[in-house]
Image (tube, helix red, strand yellow):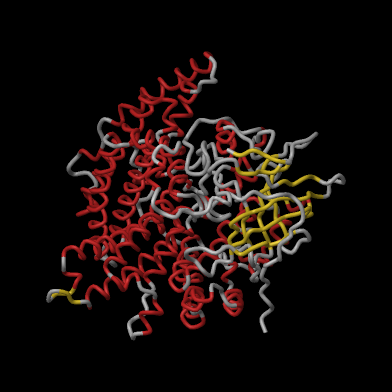
Amino acid sequence: MTTTQNGRPTPDGPDSAATADAAAATPESAGTPDSGGAPDSGGAPAAGGATPLPAEAGQVSEKEARQVAEAARESTWDRPSFGKELFLGRFRLDLIDPWPRSDPDDVARAEEFLGRFRDFLASEVDGAAIERDASIPDSVFHGLADLGAFGMKIDRKYGGLGLSNLHYCRALILAGSVSPAIGALLSAHQSIGVPQPLKMFGTAEQKQRFLPRLAAGEVSAFLLTEPDVGSDPARLATTAEPTEDGTGYRLNGVKLWATNGIVATLLVVMARVPAGEGRRGGITAFVVDGDSAGITVERRNEFVGLRGLENSLTRFHDVFVPAENVIGGEGKGLKIALTTLNTGRLSLPAMCVGAGKWALNVARGWAADRVQWGRPVGEHEAVAQKLSFIAATTYGMETMLDLCCLLADDDRNDIRIEAALVKLYASEMAWKIADELIQIRGGRGYETADSLAARGERAAAVEQMMRDLRINRIFEGSTEIMHLLIAREAVDAHLSVAGDIIDPEAGLGRKARAGARAGAFYAKWLPTLAVGRGQSPSAYAEFGPLAAHLRQVERSSRKLARSTFYAMSRWQGKMERKQAFLGRIVDIGAELFAMSAVCVRATAERDSRPENVELADLFCRQARVRVDALFAALWDNTDSVDTAAAKRILAGRYAGLEEGVITPSDELPWVAGWTPGPSTAEDVRRRIPPKP
């Protein structure tokens, strides 16, 4: 919770930062700040789809925060979704089988680009130097621009390459394997920066004005996060005041963690437009010229990993933005952000897949070469388990990503759940892969690449991979926020028919109508959860040795739906507080989605890649163990004890446990406030000079 002074936020209590990047600061929380919140029926969207806002930014109730987040989400399902059906206990394998295919002409164009891109990365990019210098050289920017890498997702009619999501992600996998900072640069620029919002919501004039510049090599950034606002956008304090003559807006505020903010010349900025006569106001998305008067890049933020990341703290003071630079209309900013992220999230798991592939190569080579007790270490069971996990999980992550990309490239699919699942799953699993790789490498895993090379050993930057990967569990929605976002979508069908029953503000009439709807829905739905195709020993026989895994997925899908229904019946309105339970529900769904994907892919490729059937079987066997543990933990856990203990911890009851160490100074606040006005800091923005 914050209070305001002079209309600006100042901290008055602790608040976790769930999204360490403007790209990460997604409006997905629905409740307590950042990692808190829960799915809730919330309020209906305002007229015209605008997001309702409380009277004063920075001073909101939990209910108001939920209403803002709820109004921003897509509320309809007009296209099929494999993930949505999976959580409802309906195993719609027909939505992903047969395995989707790309257009051959698109594949040929993409492969030609990827070949040139690979050559450039291998010969012209020194990832170790970027890590040491914490900077991507100007020459790399020029080379990327010459290749068209800044326009990979921009339509060809605007000078871009027009790559599919699949081939765009394959390009990011390549880039990230050489320098994760370059992968982050390209991803933040195209997945959530100016190109994607304009592609989906921009006017023809806006596209013609901005997209050619971006395709040619200008860099963009996305600015939502503020020093005291992470995943709870209802507290957004940056304002865009309409000018008296109606020609534009005056932008004032401070934005934190803007990836590419140091080098970007075009920005997507989220700001709060006040309501007025004939004006609905609300959080609005603007395209802002990065060199506009009144913009100061006050500092370049430094992180544990991704040392080449050009990430900024940016101040806006009376920055004029023309009215024609509004994207999608006033009050549509959060909806634009959420919709953009449906496909934008695919870039992050691409980086995780690349890390998994790289880790497998290092683990395999080292475990075969290093001998202990007369045998290569990879032949010892303790290490063999780790190798098996890295290989199977990398295959699972890649398959989930490829499937999501192929579905996204087909406008007939709604992938909001699937994209969120692969982001959540890949970021968590890649982190585990990094941890296992370090353990396999032992002391060399903890040693820097420069130190290894100095004594004549292969410079495998394993410790850097660990540092670079850690942010992915926070970027573009923290794991906690992703759990709640997906859970909200997973229970949408229930809330649409029965939400008013548990809504304390619903009158008797609304509750009665909801009761009638719920009765009709559950009378048809509940019987379908009792028996299914997965109980037939001959089901899915066309999948050969993988058929048993699909039968298990079908049965588990129904069990998952039954568990969700039972929990809603048991806790009703309190369900929104059962965040650990909801997280396990989502994790089970992610495993089932991954199992389904690998079985379909491996079967489709069994003639050309027969070894993939083995990988799919291996992955499913490991996933089934994890699913069984998650199902058991739904009801056998310490959630209530942990929650009670946390309250005592926050109250200081166990502060004595902190004695005996020197703790951080309390002279400064956990969250720094800011005051309005012109900047007093040096502008540290970086402008890439023209190519010589």
Q: Is residue 467 visible?
A: yes
Against 67, is 377 above or below? below
Question: Which quadrant does the N terminus fall into?
Answer: top right
Apparent side of residue 457 relative to residue 119 in the rendered image (left or right): left
Q: Residue furthest left?
A: 374
Residue drawn at point x = 48 percent, y = 72 percent: 179
Q: Position of residue 481 (x, y in %)?
A: 47, 45
Above or below — where is 134 with respect to 655? below
Q: Which residue occupies the extreme right position in the image?
A: 245
The residue shown at (19%, 54%) is 545
Residue 189 visible to the viewer:
no
Estimate the x, y position of residue 624 in percent, counting from the top left. 24, 48
Name above or below for residue 666 compared with residue 614.
above
Please identify the residue farthest to the front as the structure is shown. Answer: 660
Residue 151's x, y, as percent? Answer: 60, 67
Across and down, in percent, residue 324 comes to: 77, 52
Q: Is residue 85 left or right of residue 215?
A: left
Left or right? Give the position of 570 relative to 192: left
Looking at the image, which is closer to me, 372 or 667?
667
Quadrant where the C terminus sits is bottom right
Q: Nearer the viewer, residue 276 or 406?
A: 276
How many marks can you see?
0
Q: Measuring 64% from the left and 40% from the top, which residue is drawn there?
A: 58
Residue at position x 47%, y 68% in the image? 180
The correct choice, above or below, for 437 with respect to 222 in the image is below
